[in-house]
Image (cartoon, grey):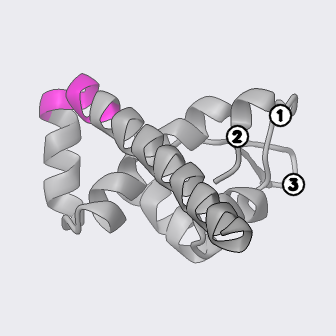
Amino acid sequence: MLNLDKDLKLYYSIGEVAKIFGVNETLLRFWEKEFPKQINPRKSGRNVRQYTKEDIEQIRIIYNLVKGRGLKIAAAREILKKNKEGVQQETEVVERLRAIRAELVELRTALGVLG
């Protein structure tokens, strides 16, 4: 996944956000309707969505609940309502573990090539 911390952009298009998560734009629009408190991108004069890094982090949490853990929308909404901080921390841990796994896979591949 894209490292947003190193990116200096203020806003991301719906296409860019969809690409970050490997989903289509229609799903992001659907989630925007289902999670209006969490996902509320700014809209320009032409009604073009502009996502901030904070919006993307909210999408990351929802993605982890719905796609990662396989929860239904209603269950994800309920968990966010009851324990948003816990879910956010869990999502951060999962992201760190994915990054570590990717590094380990790269190392294994490099060692296999060298060995």
Number of marks present in the image shown: 3
Crowding at dot 1, Cα within 10 Å, few <14 / some 14-19 / many 20+, comes out as: few
The amino acid type found where label 1 is placed reads Asp
Foreground mark, 2 or 3, reads: 2
- Indicate whether residue 85 is drawn in magenta: yes
Q: Name the residue under label 1.
A: 7
The residue sitting at 73% across, 66% down in the picture is 114
| Picture coordinates of residue 73, whole percent (x, y) | 24, 63
Secondary structure beneath dot 1 equals loop
- Indicate whether residue 87 is drawn in magenta: yes
Q: Name the residue under label 3.
A: 46
Foreground mark, 1 or 3, reads: 1
- Furthest residue toward top: 85
Task: Mark 1 or mark 3: name the one nearer the start of the chain.
Answer: 1
The amino acid type found where label 3 is placed reads Arg
Secondary structure beneath dot 3 equals loop
The amino acid type found where label 2 is placed reads Asn
Task: Mark 2 or mark 3: name the one nearer the start of the chain.
Answer: 2
- Labelled disc at residue 51: none
Q: Mark 2 points at which residue?
A: 3
| Picture coordinates of residue 34, whole percent (x, y) | 36, 57
Vertical comparison of 54 with 27: above or below:
above
- Is residue 81 shown left or right of residue 46? left
| Labels 1 and 2 touching (C-beta < 8 A) | yes
**Residue 112 visible from this viewpoint:** yes
Query: In this picture, which residue range is highlighted in magenta?
Result: 82-88
- Measured in 3D between alpha carbons, the distance from the residue under mark 1 to the one under mark 2, in whole angstroms, is 7 Å
- Measured in 3D between alpha carbons, the distance from the residue under mark 1 to the one under mark 3, in whole angstroms, is 25 Å
